[in-house]
Image (cartoon, helix red, strand yellow):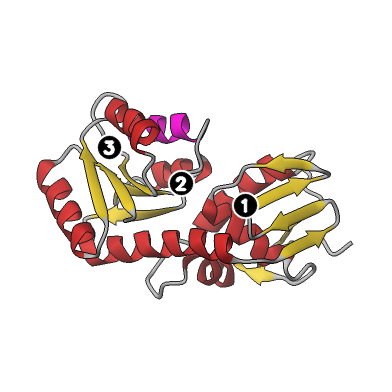
Amino acid sequence: MTTVLVVEDEIEIARVVGDYLRSAGFEVIVVGDGGSAVASVRSSKPDLLVLDLGLPGRDGLDVAREIRRWSTTPIVMLTARGDETDRIVGLELGADDYVVKPFSPKELVARVRAVLRRTRTAERGDEVLRAGDVEIDTSKMRVSVAGAQVELTPTEFHLLATLVRQPGRVFTRSQLLDAVHGVAIESYERAIDAHVKNIRRKIEPTPGSPRYVLTVHGVGYRFADA
């Protein structure tokens, strides 16, 4: 059974989220603080983490930063409506998606399923994509640049694969959101910018002067075709 770790200090929210995820067929582990979250990811190895950013003591951003040092476990953040900066920072730290409080539990389940679907689609694939020095093995969910392996989150992996499949094609942010989310619910186009920033940091020799993932100003992004 697929296991979801819910990190939420508000007991009622944790109960509702847990109930909806269990009803959707997931095994659920609930913890209420950052230290327990890190320990549970290490010991239980959940398939996905639902992480509230507004935790007491060690906040969710610090937890995400710690986990991303040694794990690519998918992360869906829970954030307060006014915390746009936290959303961007969380995505740049490697979160795969976010849901804004107050939220619909059904939307959260849809987001969780979408992120897991991206992970499984990548794992089931059998393509080897190549563009310049970049090689993507979809069956093993591996990316290498000039022979050196690069660790990407599931969302970063899916986004890069979408671009590499069609070098030179310009994708709008909206098109890239559709490609990586796969669910018809409102999202946030600046999330794509955060994911692209992460990808560049990991694959570009000089992230500030990218040679692979190029910006098309006023439109979106494309992967270099030469």
Magenta run includes residue 58: no
Q: Is residue 207 left or right of residue 6?
A: right
Disc 3 crowd rating (10 Å Cα; few below 14, some 14-19, many 20+) is some
Q: Is residue 75 left or right of residue 104?
A: right
Q: Is residue 214 left or right of residue 25?
A: right
Q: Amino acid at mark 1?
A: Val
Q: Is residue 103 left or right of residue 113?
A: left
Residue at the disc numbered 2: 95
Q: Nearer the viewer, mark 1 or mark 2?
A: 2
The numbered mark, 1 or 2, whose residue comes first in the sequence reads 2
The numbered mark, 3 or 2, whose residue comes first in the sequence reads 3
Considering every residue shown, the one lying at the far right of the view is: 226
- Which mark is on residue 54? 3
Residue at the disc numbered 1: 196
Residue at 62 percent of width and 42 percent of height: 151
The numbered mark, 3 or 1, whose residue comes first in the sequence reads 3
**Callout 1 touching callout 2 (CB < 8 Å):** no
Magenta segment range?
A: 59-68
Task: For residue 212, say whether it is visible.
Answer: no
